[in-house]
Structures are given as structure tokens and as C-alpha cells.
Image (cartoon, rainbow, N blue to C red):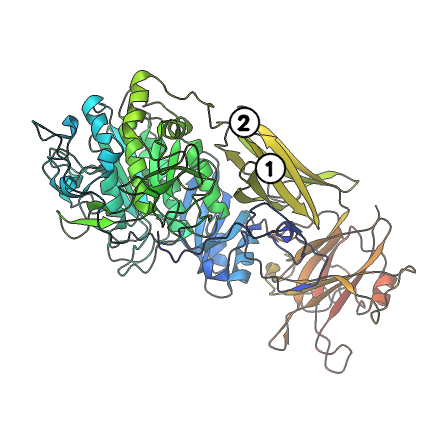
Amino acid sequence: MKKKILFFLMTIVLIVSSCNFGMNTAVIGNKDNGTVLNGYTGGSGNSSSIELPNGANYKPDDNDIVEGYFIVKTKDGFDKTLFEKKGFIVKGKISLTDTGFTYWYLNKKGDNKKNLLRAASIEGVLSAEHDYKVVEPDGSKAPNQNDGPVDPFNAETYDLTKGNYLDDPEANIADYGLSITDALRAYSEIGYGDKTVVAGIIDTGINMAHKDFKDENGESIVLYAKSCATAENGTAITPGHPFTEIPIGLNWDKGAHGTHCSGTIAARGNNNIGIAGVAWKNTKLISYQSLNAGLNGQFGGDTWSVYGALLDLTNIVEILRKAKADRSLTEIAALPSYLQTTDFQITQKTVPVNMSLGGSYGSEFAFAVLTNAVKHNILPVIAMGNEGRYTAAYPAAFPGVLAVGATNGKDKKVHFSNSGAWISVSAPGDGIKSCGIHGEDDYETMSGTSMATPFVTGTIAYLLSFTGAHDLTPYQIKALLEKTADKVDGATGFTDSLGHGRVNVYKAAKAIKDGNIPAQNDIYTEAKVTVTVKNNDGHSNDDVPCKITLVDEETHAPLAYVSLAPVSLAPVAGVENPAFKGLIKGRRYAVYGAFLGSAEKRTFTAENTDENITLQFNKKIVWVSTVANLHYNGGNDETDTRITVYKADASGDLDLNTASSIVDYDYNLLDTIYFEAETGAKYYVLITGFMKEGVFQGGNYALKIDRTPLNSNGVDIDDVGRSPNNASTNDSHEDDDTPAFAKVKGDAWGQTKGCNLVAHPIGTPPANVDLDWFYVEYPY
């Protein structure tokens, strides 16, 4: 992977404010770039923090954002015209397998932060986030590490099954991977299984015209191929078509990286051509072009194109697991056209997917897709990265995946290979020769953890060809590779640099032959851990929106940073909290969360049974909601509210000459925030409009000050006291331009009001603006 990837150092502090929707300090124009859940924006100005050992700041930089693109989650069956009415172009959609949820890829030019809030505020939207960059991989040119041809003494035949490369001439000259990992010995002594195996790869595509990707009958070994482009030199994905099928036999790969990795996985062996992949026989490839897809590689390499591909792959694999007669018409139509009439069926339990890629931010969409993939027995095999230091890249650092480091021909860790407590195994990745994109017999040499990763993917595919391994779960396979890996480069056990060691293909195959296979839940638990964050304000115990961090208590490595949806407070039902899977059995983990300046930590031991973790807070909170008033102008006013909160003095009054605000907030057009209240205290809430280039951004809105927020999609409130009762005049709560006037109006607690910010004429204090003050007595 390219060295320009911006990885997070593991010594940065996790900011508590990532869990706060309200704040204790003034914030104008919050700069958080996180996920929006049901219209409530994550992030605040609270400067408190949790000190995590080797903790990481998961807050993305603006440079990580793909300008103008958003990923939005809804229930299945959502009407896409609701997006189009708000000015969004639907670029793609895809369903999260067997969950009832759909993810949409939207495009809209303009202010990224405000457009994100616009997308989140659409009725039926469960969450929305920016699209983030996933850096395209880059295998650097490097000399091979082999001292000379591998020609066993007295070799009588040219055959991989006889333990030599002689029927694969390019490999015979340059390859060391199959020999140093004892793969040649495995082919010779144990043989090759007779089961057909499917392996996936998400990369720059594949040169299907290459001779080494054709079987003994001249047929392609590619089961199907797709791209995030509309055509070989086309534009990005189009409405209604998340990924475009590539005709079998064509070469759309412009970056070479995907073809090179594909060759390491499954280039045909014993064909008197080029090289041999680790899984050189009985292997079918699924290829997605998600990086460098445009004419000049100008698009691809983002969260949607990469993880959308994994989701699309998961859906299609689930269909192909069924016998043809059991597939519905809808399922058949969802297959690539050239598979719609096929009898081909995937019979293996685990499908490995090579992902030699990474980025600096682990997004919500990425975590959801990876978790969903593993749930459906898809095993992501992921490169550690090439920064040459201890640093977290995603998706390698996510729990439940198989992360791979790189070694060289001397069984040493390569200097560029990243380290981290989440690494599983290492494999040859320095000076690797494999297939190229320039014609049908092109070969190139590259180096990187990107090259080591497909060696492991190929190893898994080879092992799955045996009957004894065909039904293994992803975590049984992961445990098998770790248990049979060689300890190299002076390691005597697990290290952050090499993981459990360099893979040994022979030992893994022999373990399968001898029946020494790790049982389910032997090392990695198949159970899930679900986390909920609750707050008891003395009235009820509600779920609250928050982001949490999962930390390995032994290594102190942060493994995941995910949002928890406000299930109880959210107006949209069906939002589920994420679950962690693939944790190490018997290992202690900690879940960190924060709420209004307080931090909570819960530790647990990963076991074989599902577990629910609750982080409990006891805060008295007040929500201040400003949302669209659907009764006037259809709720389409471009009202831009700013919320300021003051605590009253002992007499219940407010002296603006001496008082300081406890909240000052303006993030999006219509804001919703919360703050911590004191028992029996009185407060003044000021709602006014944002001044944009000297113009007051007033208009209609609905307001509620209560212990729960309003529906972020808006409410229909008829302000019957408005005279005349129309959209353009001021509301019936007037005159409320001062705290004293608001107090005369009485306690606004728990009331839903239809309000209107109408700027006063010049000469009327305050000129050209409108101030809506509200007096509140906290009742608990």
C-alpha cells in the first residue's frame, strides 16, 4: 500500500466529546466530521478526554473526505425520490445481507457538512456519513529474493506435485514463496484437494486476458468480475447499478496491482506458462475493480467503492451458495448475467476475500460491512500496510479480520511492513513476481504487505480444496494458520511485527490431513458482544447516542471505534447497535464510552456465548430541539438556528451583563443539542438565526425543550395564535426578544411550539435580527 497513507499514531488521546451532542463550552460551527444518526450530529466542544493506553484519535481529517459524496442507511424499500427532492443524486444502492437495511451512495455539491445534515434529516434515514478515501495500493518494484532456480536434486519430472517449479518457468527463475513456506512440499507429499474453491479479491481489477488465468481447457478461472466504473474507460457508478459486470476475458485493470495479487492467489500451475499461484488448481476468482477504475485512475479508492464491493460480493456469494433450483427469480436477476443460467454452486463454508488496501479512518459503513461479511462466513484477508512502524490502518485493525505482514526470502520481517497487536500472520511479500497487465504473458515484480496478503488468501483457498477443510469457519481457518506458522526472525511466540509467524503451507495442510483442526471457539469466539449506552435521568433509563472504543486489555490496542444509535430517543425504529465478533477467547477487553464529560469503562472476557455490555450514566439532561415545522411552507424554510443556553441566577432572572452561556451551538441549519441540568435549576434558551454574509437566516421552525428530542425529520405544528395565521408573520410567542419577556410568557418545559424567526425592521432593537427567548424550569 502506498506510503502516503495517513495512519494514526497509537499514542493519541480519544476525545470524550465524540459522544456528546450537547456541550459545556461554547462551540460555533462544530468541525466534527463523524456519522450522523437520525439527524443528531455526533461531536461537541467538550474538551474532556479519556486516556487510553496506546489510544487513538479516530476523528478523520477533512482531507480524508471524498468531496460531495455521502453514504446513507435506510430500511429496505426506501423511496429514492426523497433524496432527489432534496437535491441529491443517487449514485448507487446496495442491501446489507439479510438485515432489512439498504445503503445508498449520494452525491451533492456544496457545503459537505451541511449536505451531510440534509441527508440525515430526510424522513426514513437511519444514519449518514461522508465517503472517505481508501488509498490505492502500490506494490513497489524490487528485485526478487531468490538466489537461483529451485531444481530439486534428481528431479525426474517437471511438476508442482513433484515439489518443483520447472513447469512454471517464470516462477522457477524468480519465486521463493512456495519453497520457503513449504508449499512445494505440501503439493508433493499431501497433494491437492478435489473440491472447487472460490476466492475473492477487491483491488484494481484483473487482466483476464492473461494466459495464467486460463485453465487447461482455455477457460477463464474468473467466476465473475465487476467494477465501480460504468465501462472500461467510463465514469463512476450510475444510479441503480452499484457495480458494473465486466465481460469475462477482458482487461480493465489499469493499476496492475490487482492482477499481480490475483496471480499470487491463483495463477494456474503446471501449465508450462509463467508462474503458479498458491491455489494454482481448482480455484475460481471473484474480482472487483474498486481502485484506479477511471480512464486515468481518477476515481475509485473510497469507502463506497471498496466496502460496497465487499457487500455486493457477500450478497452474490449468498445466492451462489444455494442450488440453482432454490434461487428465487429476484436472486437470479441479481447475479451477473453470465451466471444467471449456471448450475455453479459455492460449497465451501468460508470464502476468503483479499483486500490489499487500507485507509486512515475506520468508518461506520466499513465496520458494518465487514461484520456482516464475517457473519456470512466471508473472511477478509487484509494487508497491514507499508509504513514500517507500529500504526493502525483500516480495515486491518478491525476485529474479526485476518491481517497480514510481510517477510522476505531470508525469513526476516521486511522493513516496510507495519506492526500492530492485531496482526495475525506474515507471508512472503518482498520481491514477488506475478502476473502483469501488459498483454497475455506479462510478469512484474512488486513488494509490499499487499503482496504478502494474497499469498495467505491463496493458502486458504488451497486448504479449502481438501474435504477436511471445506466446512471450516473463518475463525477455524485463521486459528489453523496461526497454530501452524513458523516462528522466524528470532521470534519464539507472537510478536507485533510478525504475528504468530510466517505461514507454513505444508504444516497447515498436514494438520488438515491428520484431523488436527482447531475446534470452533477454540481460539476465536464465534459469539457476539453487543454494547448499549444508557442514561438514567431519574425519570427513565434511555439509550443515548454515543461512540465507543473497543480496546484489547492485554495489548492496549484500540480495535474499533463505532457509533451507537439512540434507539430509545430516535424517532426511527429498527436501528441496531453494532456487535463485535471474532474476539480472542479468554482475552480481556474493555469498552470505553463517554457522555457529557463523564467516562465509563466496562471490561469483559470473550467467551463462547453472546454477551450484552451496558455503559450506564446517570445524568439529568435537557434536550433543546429545533426542527422543521412541516405546517408552514412544507417545512422547506432554510432556517439556520443558533442555540444559546444560560443558567438563571438565584432569583430566576438573567443579567446578560454578567452571565456566561453554558451552551452556544451552531452546527447545521436546524440544530438539536442537549446539556446537563441541575435539580430545580432555571434556564433561559435563546434561539436566533445565523448571519450569512450579512443576511439573517430566519424562517419557521418547531421547538421543544424537554427530556427527549423532537423527531429530526420535522413535526407539523399549527401556531393558531399567529395573527394572521400564515408562514410569513411572527409567531404567537412574541414578544420574546428579552429574557424578561420570556419569563412573563411562562415555563416552556415540555411544550412543542411553532416558531418563526422574522428579522425586525431597521431601527427596532435589535435591528435586522430576531431573538426568541424561552424560560425553562427544570422539573426533576
Relative to residue 284, is residue 710 drawn left or right? right
Q: Three-letter amino acid code at disc 1?
A: Ala
The residue to which callout 2 is attached is: 586
- Locate residue 127, reporting x and y percent: 54, 48
> Going 88% across and 61% down the picture, which residue do you hit?
649
Relative to residue 139, is residue 364 drawn left or right? right
> Going 63% across and 46% down the picture, which residue do you hit?
545
Task: Kindly tell me whether residue 197 is visible in this rendering.
Answer: yes
In the picture as drawn, the residue positioned furthest to the front comes out as 490
Say what secondary structure mark 2 lies in: loop
Q: Are marks 2 and 1 in contact (CB under 8 Å)?
A: no
- Locate residue 337, reporting x and y percent: 25, 40
- Residue 200 position by quadrant: top left
Please give the label number shown on residue 590: 1
In the picture as drawn, the residue positioned furthest to the top comes out as 514
- Residue 315 position by quadrant: top left
- Locate residue 607, reporting x and y percent: 55, 25
Task: Kindly tell me whether residue 341 is visible in this rendering.
Answer: no
- Residue 650 position by quadrant: bottom right
Say what secondary structure mark 1 lies in: strand
- Locate residue 595, reporting x and y percent: 68, 47
In the picture as drawn, the residue positioned furthest to the bottom comes out as 763
Question: Which is more toward the observer, 585 or 537?
Answer: 585
